Amino acid sequence: MDRIKQEKYDLVIVGSGASGSIVAAKAAAAGKKVLILEAGPKRGLDDLTSSQIWARRQKWNGAPVEEAGSLQIAHAFNAGYGTGGSAIHHYAVWPRLHENDFNVKSTYGKSLDWPIEYKDLQPFYDQVQSEVGISGDAKAEKWRPAGADYPMPPMPIFTQGNIIAKGFEKMGMSTSPIPLAINSQPYNDRQSCLYDGWCDAGCPIGALANPLVTYLPKAFSDGAEIRNHATVSRVLEDSGKRKVSGVEYYDAEGIAHTVLAEQVVLAAFVVQNARILLNSISARHANGLANNNDMVGRYLTTHPSNYVFALFEEETQPFIGATGGQIMCQDGYADKRAIKEAFGSYQWLAGLAVKPNDLLGFANTRPDIFGDALAPFLKRAAKHFGSMVCVGEDISDPENRITLSDSKDKFGVPIAKAVHNLSAESKAMLENAVEEGKAVLTAAGATETWSAAPFGMHHVGGTVMGTKAENSVTDGFGRCHELDNLYVVGPGVFPTTGAVNPTFTIHALALRTVEEMLKAAA
Amino acid sequence: MTKISRRNFLQTSGITISCLVAGKVVALSPAQAYARELPYKTLNLTEVATIEALAEAIVPGATEAGISHYIDSQLSVEPEDTLLMVKYLVPPPFNGFYQASLASADSMRGDKEWGELDKEQMTAMVGKIATDAVTDWQGPPASFFYFIFRSDAVDVVYGTELGSKELGIPYRAHIMPSTNW
Ligand SMILES: Cc1cc2nc3c(=O)[nH]c(=O)nc-3n(C[C@H](O)[C@H](O)[C@H](O)COP(=O)(O)OP(=O)(O)OC[C@H]3O[C@@H](n4cnc5c(N)ncnc54)[C@H](O)[C@@H]3O)c2cc1C
Ligand code: SF4
């Protein structure tokens, strides 16, 4: 395989998803010559076909990941591929982390502390919220940490949401509309939501904040370039210095190229960021870059999660609304030790818009039903179904980790291996939540309730930030402790998961990182 | 930014099976391919018979909706282009997953043809597969195969505009897939 190109940019960004797109937009706006290398194909809004079968095109199609452990991270389901990354078809549930998520180790003696606090991130949350647009009701979110009010009113609560909200109320629990990065009214030249539940297939009308309508257009209009089918295999060390010189990538034909850059940002999501670093071996870095202390790949986490489902006598119209849901409850957030022998905050997202098919479709919630019984169940569920999902906090454990496998991909690069086990305390937290969820649905009038097996929602960790190279991969800005011009963005840098969906925090942190990078470059 | 303000106004190229009809290449949906008895690219006829018998017992209507052509067409493309749900759950290639499971299921019918088994016998057989109660099952766990295969059959029968209609709910596509499912 020949190395046919050697080009030079101010900044090379690996990955065009949630984190890479905001870095690209801000750096390009500051006049930097920016190149995004994206492993997957080019995608535009007109690729977002409304079909749960078609939606599978957007999932991870790169090198497979070997998985092990009692709660696997389901890489192929949770990772995206192509322009916009996983964020192209994410559900836009955008709550903030809470203050108590930043000091879990010092408060509870387990997991990790962040090297920054909520107040360091708050201005960045506020800025992203105003640039992207979030619909929500800050007052109704009685658990919400300090921050500017949402720029748009909340999304409407439809029948399913109203029915389930009554169940929470009867149980003495609070709910609010979910903060969604979806337009409840036209915002920033983007139209409002039509409440048809196609978010998982990708929202082609631009109502949902995916990178194709938020930061990528800005990046491109300010001159950033993107190269698709460009799979980065290694970051190249600038020998003898605490610096990197660029990256190596393979094009669709398997030809290797080198791109030189003043600064490099890894934005290839949790598993691939770690894989690239581990594969970046040199004489001085026999274990890979930024890995002198064997920290790369460690503290792989996910949100241990569980669905609960119900059928109601009355019609719930479960096909209406956004896929992410309608109402939220974070009563289980403040005290991570509230339940005996369990650990971790959790939140409920309820009133999810559902389709009949695919992994999360309502047909698959009862795989035991088949034959003549199937059609009557599906017809009933199509109109009377209700669902909610508990998003739980993981415990950051160094033994849950990403390493390199002995198997190689088509370019000869070792594939990643991801091991994730669920702790007994997290399991207890989920079991308690499932009972609570069923009780809520019963209180709401459900005629029957059931649950699914626990699963891992979102990928987090693997390149965590911290105070020093001995306990982490990057500093509080996402800069690798051991290399002055190599940065990591995305949920991989989170030391802990909290119990909220990560993409708002990904944006806020990446914005903080790029501002620091621009200062460092100046 | 590309703006799409009206529903259904973009037609993308759909999941189709290409074939020669009167000297012209035409694209057919799996249901149309089934109706026209198009040849299979990857599956053999024993596998097709097993797919149709099992799928019909699990999701009635799956045979006519084109389950065998759906699976055949999606196993005939590069693994990264397949639209089968299996891609979330097992590493590629996917042919072995289906072929080993189908061979195990096929051996459950003994000397009988699929058509000779009555509804009760088929239901009992599916029940065994779903609960890992098959002795000598080779390949991926039977219940795991059942889960994925049932989902494939649900895809072709209910994952379409027609399927939504059958369930009495609106499909409300932004961008309609150009084949019917
Ligand atoms: C179904 C689903 C629903 C979700 N819903 C929500 C939600 O409601 N709220 C929320 O907060 N989060 C949600 N998420 C999670 C969210 O999508 C991710 O956390 C987020 O997109 C991660 O951002 P990222 O920039 O790190 O990675 P991504 O957005 O995935 O972007 C990474 C990009 O890097 C590319 N890449 C990988 N390896 C390489 C390489 N070697 N070379 C070049 N490019 C490479 C990938 O192809 C990809 O395009 C959801 C995810 C899924 C799958
Ligand atoms: S429900 Fe709203 S955000 Fe989701 S796809 Fe439809 S229009 Fe887009």
Image (cartoon, grey):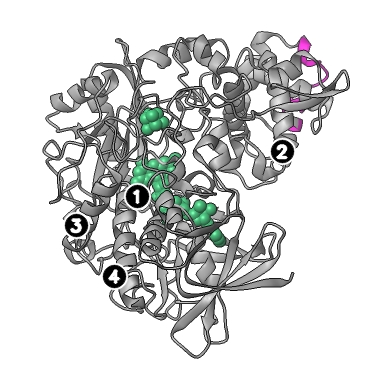
Query: Between marks 1 and 4, how big is the CA–CA gap?
Result: 18 Å
Q: Do the residues labelled 3 and 4 touch (CB within 8 Å)?
A: no
Of B91 and A340, which appears nearest the observer?
B91
In this view of the protein, can residue A342 be seen by the observer? no
Query: Looking at the image, how many numbered discs can be counted on the residues?
Result: 4
According to the image, label 3 marks what residue?
A122
Disc 4 packing (10 Å; few <14; some 14–19; many ≥20)? many
Q: Mark 3 lies on which chain?
A: A
- Which residue matches tag 1? A503
Rounded to the nearest whole Å, what is the CA distance between mark 2 and mark 4? Answer: 51 Å
**Which residue is rendered at x = 20% and y = 48% of the image?**
A340
Q: Which of B63 and A239 is in front in this view?
A: A239
Q: Mark 4 points at which residue?
A: A476
Label located before the other in sequence (1 or 3): 3
Residue B104 falls within the magenta-colored stretch: yes
**Nearer-N-terminus badge (1/4):** 4
Per the image, label 1 sits on a secondary structure element best described as: helix
Residue situated furthest bottom in the rendering: A240
